[in-house]
Image (cartoon, coloured by chain):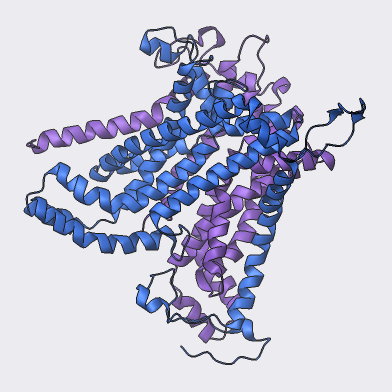
Chain colours: A purple, B blue
Amino acid sequence: MTLTAKWRGRLLYAGVAAVVAYCLAPFYWMVVSSLRRTSDIFDTSLLPSPVSFENYRAVFSPSQGFTHALLNSLIVAGITTALALLLATFTAYAMARLEFRFKRLILTLIIATSMFPVVSIVVPLLKLFTDIGWINTYQAMIVPSMSFALPLAVWNLTTFFRQMPDELEHAAMIDGCTRGQAFRKIIVPLAAPGIFTTAIITFIAAWNEFLIALSMTNKPAMQTAPVSISKFSGATQFETPFGSQMAAGVLVTVPLVVMVLLFQRRIVAGLTAGAAK
Amino acid sequence: MADIKIPPGTAADAPGPTALRPGRHSPPVGLRRQRARATAGSGRMAALLVSPTLLVLSIVVLYPTVMALKESLYGTKGLDPKTGFIRTTEPFVGLRNYGDIFGTGGDRFWNAFWNTTFFTVVTVGLETLIGVAMALIMHKAFRGRALVRAGILVPWAVPTAISALLWRWIFNSNGIANALVGHQILWTTEGFHAKVAVIIAEVWKTAPFIGLLVLAGLQVIPKEVYEAARIDGASALGQFWHITLPLVKPALLVAVLFRCLDALRMFDLPYILVGAQKNSVETLSMLAQNEASNVRFGPASAYAVLLFLYVLLIALAFVRVLGTDLAGDGGAAGKGAGRNRRVRVPALRRAEVTA
């Protein structure tokens, strides 16, 4: 490698540009396509001309039921995240701060469940929920979603709690706090950023879930956004409404992307905490 | 740290052992045995804190798994060939569902099995290559690092279902992919090109994630190691091969394990991009879901059980290779760090030797 420093720098910039293009180009194409008119949806120009919001209007037409699907997604992902966080906060605290028998085994088991093929629990639960009349209910989507949300939250929070200095707690306990009080008054406020990041990561996982939402519903009124968009109907049976699918895709993705960009430092820390320290 | 006798009742208030708590910094193996013993108090408190999670996971994971095992031994409702009556209950058929898979009617299963395996091997292989390349670029880049990191998170945040629709649009017969290639390929119809379409879409979404994890591994390698290697005259390639790769290996293996287990249960992408019941892309998850949605719970459960065993087998194989339980004290983090410490010296020595 006898490259001059100048060329090295240029190569590096080319590499950076390539990485950014690789990541953003398909997403950019979704945004551009969503802003085209239906008549020129097959254009391959890099900018939509003229810019039209026709697709976005089509998405919100009552016949697609997309607004309702967004609400369903929000309810299912929101409740799943809240429940998972509540349980995981206690468990993760025990994992990070307490000594007890079988700790490693229990934590390993919890993590192992997150690698479970979702379909292996969807099949039996589908039969069970059919028998007890739970099909097309929120709980039929929330309960199975806990199977991946809870381990994810426990894993992330355990890592966060472990990174926190425990001298503060001990100081508080020496000053007469009980362990519970120390947890409430010292740990939770300090761990708030970690809990918040875990909430985002868990929420994104629950929001993006497709298989459970697809299997547990058969009424359009109960579908979550990803399922609803995948079943968008065009004017005729033989035409896929690509424009409105792209527009809906943008609407579903943009909140996540904004969240990710705002808290990227924390999210990256959360995502990579388990892999390398 | 002496165990103080605490009257029960106030036990929960006892400060936990402070001495060597593993998980923060794993003590050397020799010291492990002297770890402070769990007090009764912290044990009871831990039980209280951990049990809700275990209970929920038992209900949503363990119970359905047991149910799937039982269910896979039953047939489907329908005509009873013996009596000619319509059965209202599912007949017990023993291992016939499994027998069918490994016997005569197993074509669809084996096709799905090979698809799943093919997708996993190819996508994870490509993701690892692209991810490591991305990580190296990001690690070297100082300006624009925030931009790259933000960009890299976008594919991760896009829901798989939406990314599948997006690629379906890109691969449309009049879409941008054909415009770029200059051929009219019907990407999303049956055939090998459908596999290619699925692989491209999957790699786009997940390679950046591997890049992120590897980057985290790169950032903990001390600069001195490279300086020493440079002084000894190791080439850039030699540095990568003898220093970077061995030191990043723990982080990379964890990333690859997670990705493998994820790829083995692939469902959303082929289902939306190409469609259900398409031979060329049907995965085991899709097969089980399809059977279940057609109310054939027996065969569906058998497929689900086999997929579960397959995933378990791969996971166990990985754990053997990693030589550690991933979630042990301090998780892979502690292990990685420990290994780094151990590896650093030989790596340095080797760098000297190759110089």
Which of the 4 quarters of the picture holds residue B224? Answer: bottom left
Which residue is located at x 56 percent, y 10 percent? A38
Q: Position of B67 compared to A201: left or right?
A: right
B188 versus B243 height, above or below: above
Residue A135: image location, x then y, percent:
79, 37
Which residue is located at x 44 percent, y 7 percent? B184
Q: Nearer the viewer, residue A175 or B276?
A: B276
Residue B241: image location, x then y, percent:
21, 45
Q: Nearer the viewer, residue A223 or B320?
A: B320
B190 versus B255 height, above or below: above
Residue B122: image location, x then y, percent:
41, 31
Observer able to see residue B107: yes
Which of the 4 quarters of the picture holds residue A84? Answer: bottom right
Which of the 4 quarters of the picture holds residue B227? Answer: bottom left
Observer able to see residue A229: no
Residue A101: image location, x then y, percent:
56, 73
Q: Nearer the viewer, residue B205 or B335?
A: B335
A17 versus B143 height, above or below: above
Q: Exactly how many numbered labels are in the figure?
A: 0
Which residue is located at x 16 percent, y 58 percent? B348
